Amino acid sequence: MVIRRPQPEEPTAQLTLFKLGRFHYQVLVTNLELQPLNLWRFYNDRAGIELIIRQLKGNYALGAIPTCHFFANKTYFHLLLLAYNLINWFKRLCLPAEFQNATLQTLRERILLIPAQLARTDNRPRLLLPASGPRENAWRYALQKIQRPKH
């Protein structure tokens, strides 16, 4: 089955075979006996995993396996998945709605790379954030969520 779609304004999960003018073309080869629209929906939903794999390769260093030992590589892979899941739970539970679908790179640029100072006040460590800035609201929201977790 060949699919011709107008070029989307936003990137989609489904990869394209090629672009020609204002159209993107996809080819699906399958042995499923579904109507064309249902077939497209089925495979388009599954294409989301491709974005996760691309993100793991690019942002979480999955593209370079560090050793030649199976168990070390397996441990490395599980640590990467743990990091991926921790970031996703952090987004879901601690960040405002505008950051729910953000990639790790976006989180780095807009949230995590913020100048701050770790200081001790009354023998307790405190994180001193800038008084104002474009990321202030997101950080304050996250800190508020972290300090008052739901039971």
Image (cartoon, rainbow, N blue to C red):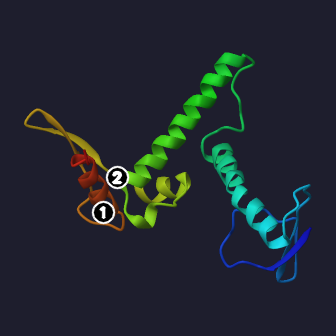
Nearer the observer, 135 or 88:
88
* Residue 113 appears anywhere in the view: no
Q: How crowded is mark 2: few (under 14 residues within 10 Å), some or many (20 or more)?
A: few
Task: Place residue 3 in its image quadrant.
Answer: bottom right
Q: Where is residue 71 in the image (x, y as percent from the top left)?
A: 66, 17
Badge 2 vs badge 1, beta-carbon distance below 8 Å: no
Measuring 29% from the left and 59% from the top, which residue is drawn there?
141
Residue placed farthest to the front in the image?
Answer: 33
* Element type where label 2 sits in the image: loop
Residue position marked by numbered label 1 in the rendering: 136
Measuring 57% from the left and 37% from the top, which residue is drawn there?
81
Who comes first in sequence, dot 2 or dot 1?
2
* Element type where label 1 sits in the image: helix
* Residue 122 appears anywhere in the view: yes
Q: Position of residue 12 (x, y in %)?
A: 69, 67
Please give the label number shown on residue 113.
none
Give the amino acid type for the residue marked by disc 2 in the picture. Answer: Pro
Nearer the observer, 114 or 147:
147
Q: Which of marks 2 and 1 is in front?
A: 1
Measuring 64% from the left and 44% from the top, which residue is drawn there?
56
Say if 149 sits above or below 14 in the image.
Answer: above
Q: Position of residue 2 (x, y in %)?
A: 91, 70
Please give the label number shown on residue 115.
2
Give the amino acid type for the residue marked by disc 1 in the picture. Answer: Glu
- Tell me the quadrant of the picture where the N terminus can be found: bottom right
Say if 49 sits above or below 22 in the image.
Answer: above
| Number of marks drawn | 2
Task: Place residue 62 in its image quadrant.
Answer: top right
Task: Place residue 80 in its image quadrant.
Answer: top right
- Tell me the quadrant of the picture where the C terminus can be found: top left
Label 2 and label 1: CA atoms lie apart by 11 Å
